């Protein structure tokens, strides 16, 4: 539960769909400013969540069982990593992949139900956030707040960058890292009687180290693959943007051309009407002239006849 007014406001705001966020935040900031000017300013500075962060925040609210199971796996994964238990890392990693796959289906359903079907790039960010929440304890705590501003990303088992990732209260200081107690030194008698055990322990430790390195390599390969997918998605998005720009430009050109043609068509219709009117007027004038000419010929013939009679 939120322990300060800013976090309480953030809890409400980050449950909204992104389109509603800005207006709701501004209204909440104005309301808070009436009583606490500083609080109002801080509320007004809350950032709209990215699409992936919004989906994760809704996932935290709507599927707490999935989140609890993911948190449990995260604890087991970190303990196995600290112990160098390669076998457990492999088993837990397999379970994590299955759980994250199920969580991604839930995330997709959440976005679809809100009328915001996610792109492949957004789902990749959601997946990276779920992975980061299991790798780093502080990232897991930030993830469970349901107030993420942006997605999270883990690189191997390194600490996850949480700068500006959470709105309101979050674990700003990382919890004390779990340390593994060193075994007590054996007595001389134990060293003498347990030489074989030491050899076996050394062999087991070497096997764990090998398994841990293999798991790390797999995790790093997963990260590289995810980054490649992200890069490919970015390129596809850029290409789609170029295509959209070209299509919009072409559509504008065609609309302008259609407007010019429609304007010219109107002008031609007017010109044709004027020409047809002139044609009718000319026809009437020609008819009158033909009549006058016929009459003149008759007059000439009559005059010539009269002249002949005089002869």
Image (tube, rainbow, N blue to C red):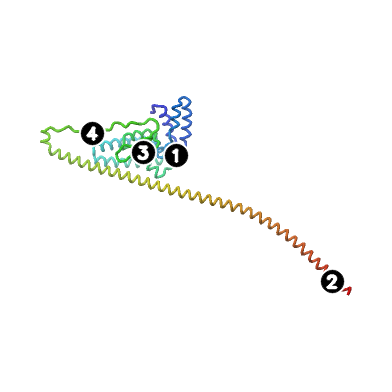
Q: Is residue 215 rendered to the left or right of residue 53?
A: left
Q: Is residue 261 rendered to the left or right of residue 285?
A: left
Single out the residue that lies furthest toward the right.
310
The answer to whether any part of residue 111 appears in the image is yes
Provide the secondary structure element on which disc 4 rests.
Answer: loop
Q: x%, y% of residue 222?
A: 31, 44
Closest to the camera, between mark 2 and mark 4, is: 2
- The numbered disc on residue 152 is 3
- Mark 3–mark 1 Cα distance, whole angstroms, equals 23 Å
Q: x%, y% of residue 193?
A: 10, 36
Closest to the camera, between mark 1 and mark 2, is: 2
- Mark 2–mark 4 Cα distance, whole angstroms, equals 143 Å
253 up-or-down from 69: above or below: below
Whichever of labels 3 and 4 marks the residue nearer the N terminus, that label is 3
Q: Which residue is mark 2?
A: 304
Whichever of labels 2 and 3 marks the residue nearer the N terminus, that label is 3
- The numbered disc on residue 114 is 1
Provide the secondary structure element on which disc 2 rests.
Answer: helix
- Assess whether mark 1 and mark 4 are in contact (beta carbons under 8 angstroms): no
- Mark 4–mark 1 Cα distance, whole angstroms, equals 46 Å
Mark 1 packing: few (<14 Cα in 10 Å), some, or many (20+)?
few
Whichever of labels 4 and 1 marks the residue nearer the N terminus, that label is 1
Instruction: Say which residue appears at 58% left-offset and 52% top-offset.
Output: 260
Mark 2 packing: few (<14 Cα in 10 Å), some, or many (20+)?
few
Q: Which residue is mark 4?
A: 180
Q: x%, y% of residue 119?
A: 41, 44
Closest to the camera, between mark 3 and mark 1, is: 3
- Assess whether mark 4 and mark 3 are in contact (beta carbons under 8 angstroms): no
């Amino acid at each position: 539960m939120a322990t300060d007014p800013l976090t309480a406001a953030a809890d409400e705001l980050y449950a909204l769909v992104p389109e509603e966020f800005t207006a709701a935040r501004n209204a909440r900031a104005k309301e808070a400013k009436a009583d606490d000017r500083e609080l109002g300013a801080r509320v007004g500075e809350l950032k709209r969540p990215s699409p992936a962060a919004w989906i994760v925040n809704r996932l935290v609210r709507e599927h707490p069982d999935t989140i609890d199971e993911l948190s449990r796996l995260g604890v087991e994964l970190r303990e196995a990593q600290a112990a160098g238990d390669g076998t457990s890392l492999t088993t837990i990693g397999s379970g994590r992949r299955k759980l994250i796959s199920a969580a991604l289906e839930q995330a997709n359903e959440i976005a679809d139900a809100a009328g915001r079907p996610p792109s492949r790039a957004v789902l990749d960010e959601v997946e990276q956030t779920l992975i980061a929440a299991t790798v780093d304890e502080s990232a897991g705590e930030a993830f469970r707040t349901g107030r993420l501003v942006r997605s999270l990303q883990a690189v191997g088992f390194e600490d996850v960058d949480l700068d500006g990732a959470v709105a309101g209260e979050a674990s700003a200081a990382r919890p004390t890292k779990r340390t593994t107690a060193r075994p007590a030194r054996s007595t001389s008698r134990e060293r003498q009687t347990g030489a074989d055990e030491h050899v076996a322990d050394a062999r087991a430790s070497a096997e764990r180290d090998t398994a841990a390195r293999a798991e790390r390599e797999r995790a790093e390969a997963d990260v590289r693959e995810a980054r490649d997918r992200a890069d490919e998605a970015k390129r596809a998005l850029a290409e789609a943007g170029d295509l959209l720009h070209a299509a919009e430009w072409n559509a504008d050109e065609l609309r302008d051309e259609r407007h010019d043609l429609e304007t010219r068509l109107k002008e031609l219709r007017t010109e044709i009407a004027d020409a047809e009117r002139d044609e009718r007027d000319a026809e009437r004038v020609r008819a009158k002239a033909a009549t006058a000419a016929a009459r003149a010929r008759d007059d000439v013939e009559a005059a010539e006849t009269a002249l002949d009679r005089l002869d």
